[in-house]
Image: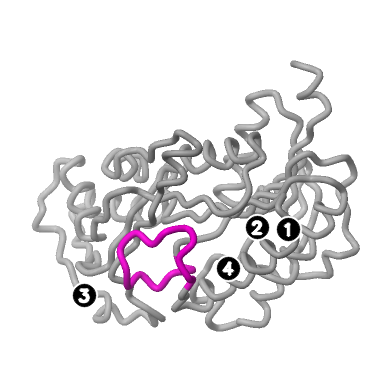
Amino acid sequence: MTQARESATSLVVGAGGMIGRALADRLDREGWPVLRTTRAPRPDAVTLDLAQDASAWAPPCEVDVGYLCAAVVSLDQCRKDPAGTFAVNVTGTVSLARTLLRRGAHVVFTSTNLVFDGSSPQPRFDAPVAPATEYGRQKAEAERQLMALSDRVCIVRLSKVLGPGTPLLARWAEDLRRGRVIHPFADMPVAPVSLDFAVEVLLRVGQRRSSGIVQVSGTEEVTYEAVARRIADRLGVSQGLIVPIPAAASGLNLEHIPRHAALDVTRLLDELGMTPPDVWSTIDGGFA
């Protein structure tokens, strides 16, 4: 391990979540010192609950890059408890970022394509935000406050991230294997990226000390019906088990049904030299 790696600690806030866990594990594998935080106590992590007053917390060591991956991501929970989730997604997150910046760290914040309402195809990173969900509004507000703090902040907006065994896809695959009918949305778009690629982008912007906003999504939009049909095809089961429905007919309390999910990824391509993986390979990896 080089001397630089011995002294450059990365902080991963939210290491209990899918993205934070994968990021921390990747840093570990590559030999970078990493400090994990999780809300629930764990022997390999420092306990940090952003719902509490984060202004009094400071990392126990010098931090080179702080990756802020912790969030309440449930759209339903954000809608039902806007004040409680705002405390985590905005107040606690910004307070922690302020502490890290004051101590000289670079901050990388994971955001979402839901800062847009999906009415326009592939919005640019500098397009005005227009969230249509409470979760999207909270992320947009966190972005605004973070960008006002320092030029040592990078916002990474992610579309749907699919990792191995993504719950929805894994459940569909299991139902299809057992001959059960599934009902994917025929009119809900998704432009997924793989968990591995999302982690690679986070590492790249952290190592380069990128600032501003970087957008990450699949370059092709497909419907959830198309995702389900791909799974059926890969499993070799009957397409007749797939009975698509409109999202509005699902009985779920959906705040908003977007027309588009993909983001403009020009900066990702031109400045970072990174190309999102093929959407279909991303989907294949999501139910394995």
Which quadrant holds residue 57?
A: bottom right
Quarter of the view holding residue 273: top left
Sequence-wise, which precedes: disc 1 or disc 4? 1
User: How much space separates mark 3 and mark 4, taking CA atoms?
Assistant: 27 Å
Circles 1 and 2: CB atoms closer than 8 Å: yes
Say which mark, if any, is on residue 139. Answer: 4
Horizontal arrangement in the rendering, residue 40 relative to residue 163 (left or right): right
Find the distance from the CA under tag 1 to the CA under tag 4. Answer: 19 Å
Element type where label 1 sits in the image = loop
Task: State which mark lies toward you, 3 or 4.
Answer: 4
- Which corner quadrant holds the C terminus? top left
Residue occupying the point 35% across, 69% down: 118
For label 2, the SS is loop
Coordinates of residue 76 in the picture (x, y in percent): 49, 76
Which quadrant: the N terminus? top right
Q: Which badge, 3 or 4, comes first in the chain's sequence?
A: 4
Disc 3: CA contacts within 10 A as few (<14), some (14-19) or many (>=20): few
Kindly identify which residue carries mark 2.
70
Q: Does residue 90 appear to the left or right of 125 in the view shown?
A: right
Point out the tag, 1 or 3, that comes first from the N-terminus: 1
* x and y percentages locating residue 199 in the rendered image: 54, 40
The Cα–Cα distance between marks 2 and 4, rounded to whole angstroms, is 12 Å
Q: Give the residues in magenta.
A: 114-129
